[in-house]
Image (cartoon, rainbow, N blue to C red):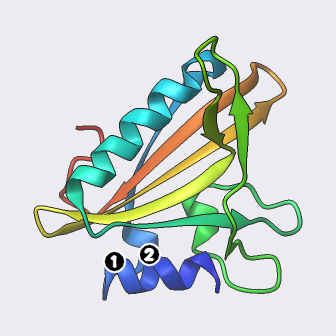
Amino acid sequence: MLLRNLLLDHFGALPLEDLVVARQEFPLWMRADVQGEIECFFAALGGHRFSGARLRGNVSFRFPNLIEEGADAPAAGPAVWSALDLGDAEPVRCLLRGLWLAKESGRPLGLLFELDDDSNYGRRLRVEIATLPGDDPEH
């Protein structure tokens, strides 16, 4: 299933081109903490949906690209995890990329999470939040 179809189902009648997207990048060393906060946030909301992603061609994992159709459009797929040794008794399970969809106070929101290789800054964590117009995705 294309991720576009998941977004269409989740955001309803709103044209996906009208979504408001906020992007934040974090240094790689914050990966486990940011992921943990995201998981706690969505667990508290309840009723959320999570999906991994299969990327085709040279498409990057960003909300503007998730709304694309066609053979190279991002599709739902298995989540890919890696074990990160932080010195605790057990390694922390860390995500490569994923998409969460939920409703907060009845308003749909989406969050994507991806480790990104940036030629200027090295490997970083990117988080994007998509909301309806009039919502504030940065809070």
Residue 60 falls in which quadrant of the image? bottom right
As shown in the figure, which amino acid type bears the numbered disc 2?
A: Leu
Graded by Cα atoms within 10 Å as few (under 14), some (14 to 19) or many (20 or more), the crowding at tag 1 reads many
Instruction: Residue 11: give x, y in percent of width and height.
Output: 34, 77
Above or below for 51 versus 92: below
The structure residue drawn at horizontal position 54% and vertical position 60%, both measured from the top left corner, is 63
The answer to whether marks 1 and 2 mark residues whose Cβ atoms lie closer than 8 Å is yes
Instruction: Residue 107: give x, y in percent of width and height.
Output: 18, 67
Mark 1 highlights which residue?
A: 11
Q: Earlier in the sequence, mark 1 or mark 2?
A: 1
Residue 4 falls in which quadrant of the image? bottom right
Instruction: Residue 41: give x, y in percent of width and height.
Output: 29, 45
Mark 2 highlights which residue?
A: 16
Residues at marks 1 and 2, CA–CA distance in whole angstroms: 8 Å
Q: For the C terminus, which image quadrant?
A: top left
Q: Is residue 5 left or right of residue 130?
A: right
Q: Is residue 118 left or right of residue 37?
A: right
Which marked residue is nearer to the observer: mark 1 or mark 2? 1
The structure residue drawn at horizontal position 78% and vertical position 30%, both measured from the top left corner, is 118
Q: Residue furthest left?
A: 105
The structure residue drawn at horizontal position 38% and vertical position 69%, both measured from the top left corner, is 18
Above or below for 5 versus 88: below
Instruction: Residue 90: give x, y in percent of width and height.
Output: 62, 26
Which secondary structure, mark 2?
A: helix
Above or below for 110 versus 56: above
As shown in the figure, which amino acid type bears the numbered disc 1?
A: Phe
Graded by Cα atoms within 10 Å as few (under 14), some (14 to 19) or many (20 or more), the crowding at tag 2 reads some
Residue 88 falls in which quadrant of the image? top right
Above or below for 16 versus 9: above
User: In this view of the protein, which residue sits in the foreground, 113 or 86?
Assistant: 86
